[in-house]
């Protein structure tokens, strides 16, 4: 009897939902799951990722009693940075800690200026929704989520 090999994780895949669009993301940890979900959401908006251009960084700090609420708040903040500050995330480091009162998130996000770099945003996400929102651990001990976006 040997060590069970780790199951393969698909960082994210885009899913259709009636008139909206969603993301099914996976990760070995909650931190990786949140990162993959954010990148999946941003891939709906534009395909211009991983550019080796001048990057700026910003921090996100959130506290919530519920993991789904934390995910929605995190995605809303990433979306706010794109829409209102013109900052498109290219990479991020996310830390999530479970506490007696719920969850704490700290993220360092590396982003580029959308208008400054001439980045085309191909689709607008109007909102992160709670429709069918789920965060769960599967039988292979992999974190999963499904999030639907109003487009």
Image (cartoon, rainbow, N blue to C red):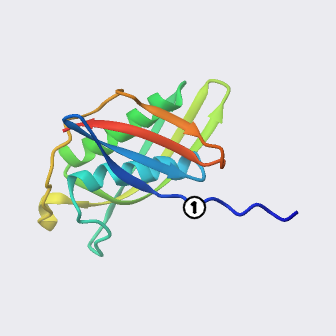
Residue 4 seen by the camera: yes
Task: Residue at 15% x, 67% y: name it.
Answer: 117
The image quadrant that residue 89 belongs to is bottom left
- Of residues 16 and 94, the one nearer the viewer is 16
Looking at the picture, how far across and down is residue 115, in whole percent? 12, 59
Q: Say above or below: 150 vs 84.
A: above
The image quadrant that residue 126 belongs to is top left
- Of residues 3 and 51, the one nearer the viewer is 3
Q: Say above or below: 60 vs 68.
A: below
Tell which residue pokes out farthest to the bottom in this image: 52
- Label 1 Cα crowd, 10 Å radius (few <14 / some 14-19 / many 20+): few
Q: Quadrant of the N terminus?
A: bottom right
Looking at the picture, how far across and down is residue 116, in whole percent? 13, 64
Q: Which residue is mark 1?
A: 8
Looking at the picture, how far across and down is residue 65, in whole percent? 55, 24
Tell which residue pokes out farthest to the right in this image: 1
Looking at the picture, how far across and down is residue 61, in whole percent? 46, 40
Task: Residue at 12% x, 60% y: name it.
Answer: 120
């Amino acid at each position: 009897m040997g060590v069970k090999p780790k199951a393969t994780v698909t960082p994210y895949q885009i899913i259709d939902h009636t008139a909206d669009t969603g993301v099914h993301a996976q990760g070995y940890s909650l931190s990786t799951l949140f990162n993959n979900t954010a990148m999946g959401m941003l891939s709906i908006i534009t395909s211009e990722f991983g550019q080796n251009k001048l990057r700026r960084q910003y921090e996100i700090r959130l506290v919530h009693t519920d993991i789904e609420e934390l995910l929605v708040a995190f995605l809303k903040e990433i979306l706010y940075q794109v829409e209102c500050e013109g900052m498109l995330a290219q990479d991020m480091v996310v830390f999530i800690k479970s506490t007696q009162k719920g969850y704490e998130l700290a993220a360092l996000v590396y982003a580029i200026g959308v208008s400054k770099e001439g980045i085309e945003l191909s689709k607008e996400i109007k909102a992160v929704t709670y429709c069918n929102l789920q965060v769960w651990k599967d039988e292979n001990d992999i974190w999963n989520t499904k999030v639907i976006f109003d487009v």
